[in-house]
Image: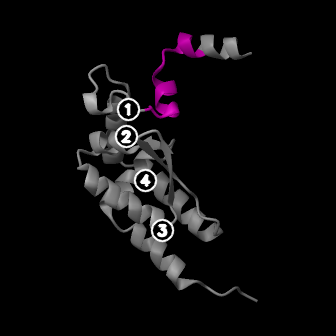
Amino acid sequence: MKSKIDLSEMENLYTALSDQTRLRLLNLMREDEICVCFFTEALGESQPKISRHLAYLRKADLVEARREGKWMHYRIKFPENPFAREILYDTLEWLKSQDEMEVEYENLVEACCSLNVPVTISKAPKPETIVESNKPVHEKEELETFLL
């Protein structure tokens, strides 16, 4: 016997994924949690707009937030429902394959790791996967050797 379909859960998922700004935010979070300040730099959008869309994604239970001092970090939260989880995973893969989304992800890397970071985000905690991917190979090897 099939389980009861929760149409409101489906509606929340599809509504959350039906907005370009929210898709752009999910694209930037595909590898790691991100501080709100980096979203504004990478997307060139205002902080209130970014926060509004992040709140919508939280309401849809697609992202979760964590506070670190004055910084708010967001990361993707995959749904428990296997169908919803697959839809989100496929959406992220589709986003990743788009040239425009890759450019925005590169903007995120630039905002996180540039020497000329704006003062407003200069002390913000950087996403680990981005920082790690931008280290020269010898630094990564030294760190791995040290940790052994």
Residue in the image at 37% along x and 30% along y:
112
**What's the residue at 37%, 49% (across, down)?**
98
Q: Are marks 2 and 1 in contact (CB under 8 Å)?
A: yes
**Amino acid carrying mark 2 in the image:** Tyr
Q: In this view, does 119 lie to the left or right of 82?
A: left
Is residue 128 covered in magenta?
yes
Give the residue type that dot 4 points to.
Leu
Q: Magenta segment range?
A: 125-140
Name the dominant secondary structure of the magenta segment: helix
Pointers 3 and 1 in contact (CB under 8 A)?
Answer: no
Work out how far the residue at label 3 is from the one at label 1, CA to CA, in angstroms. 27 Å
Q: Disc 3 or 1, which lies upstream in sequence?
A: 3
Give x and y (percent) for residue 110: 33, 29
Q: How far apart are marks 4 and 3 (CA)?
A: 13 Å
Residue name at image x 33 percent, y 27 percent: 122
Q: Is mark 4 on a helix, strand or loop?
A: helix
> SS for tag 2?
helix
User: Cα distance, mark 2 to mark 3?
Assistant: 23 Å
> Which residue was labeled with disc 2?
105
The label shown at residue 109 is 1
Observer-side mark, 4 or 3, equals 3
Q: Name the residue under label 4.
A: 26
Q: Is residue 118 visible?
A: no
